[in-house]
Image (cartoon, rainbow, N blue to C red):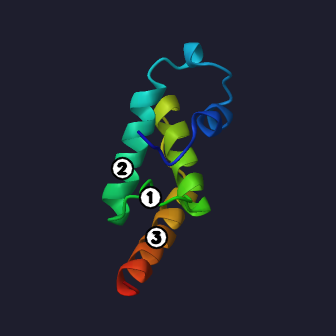
Amino acid sequence: MAHILTQEEAFSALRISSMDECPNLGLLMSAVDDGIKTETGKDWTAGTTIDPTAKLAASLLLICLKEGTDLPKSYGYKIVQLEAKALEAAQSV
């Protein structure tokens, strides 16, 4: 299954080097994908190239899910940007 972030990108965001350091990484990555899809109305894993804004939002959400911390304001800004991109893409079809 494709994710917004590659495993290497997730490792980098979480500052880990192996699955041993986060055994539930696959579940977290799926939760991130589902959360961003729900918030924006678009499946960001569907294209051949994943939007860099989606990757940044996914990194922020992944870190917060793993660490149990609140989402930063910048996450909300990225979601608004992604919503606008999703709407623009839907209107151009």
- Residue 31: x and y, percent? 37, 40
Position of the N terminus, as image quadrant, is: top left
Secondary structure state at the residue bearing disc 3: helix
Residue at the extreme front of the image, as rendered: 48
Q: Are marks 1 and 3 in contact (CB under 8 Å)?
A: no
Quick check: 15 above or below 76? Answer: above
List the residue tagged with mark 2: 35
- Residue 89: x and y, percent? 42, 79
- Residue 33 visible in the snapshot: yes
In space, the residues marked 1 and 3 are separated at their CA atoms by 14 Å
List the residue tagged with mark 3: 80
Q: Are marks 1 and 2 in contact (CB under 8 Å)?
A: no
- Residue 44: x and y, percent? 44, 58
List the residue tagged with mark 1: 44
Position of 92 compared to 5: left or right? left
Residue 40: quadrant of the picture: bottom left
Disc 1 residue type (three-letter): Trp
Residue at 57 percent across and 45 percent down: it is 59
- Residue 71: x and y, percent? 49, 48
In space, the residues marked 1 and 2 are separated at their CA atoms by 11 Å
- Residue 68 visible in the snapshot: no
Secondary structure state at the residue bearing disc 1: loop
Residue nearest the observer in this picture, 69 or 8:
8
Disc 3 residue type (three-letter): Val
Q: Residues within 10 Å of mark 3 (few under 14, many from 20)?
A: some
Position of 49 compared to 47: left or right? right
Q: Are marks 2 and 3 in contact (CB under 8 Å)?
A: no
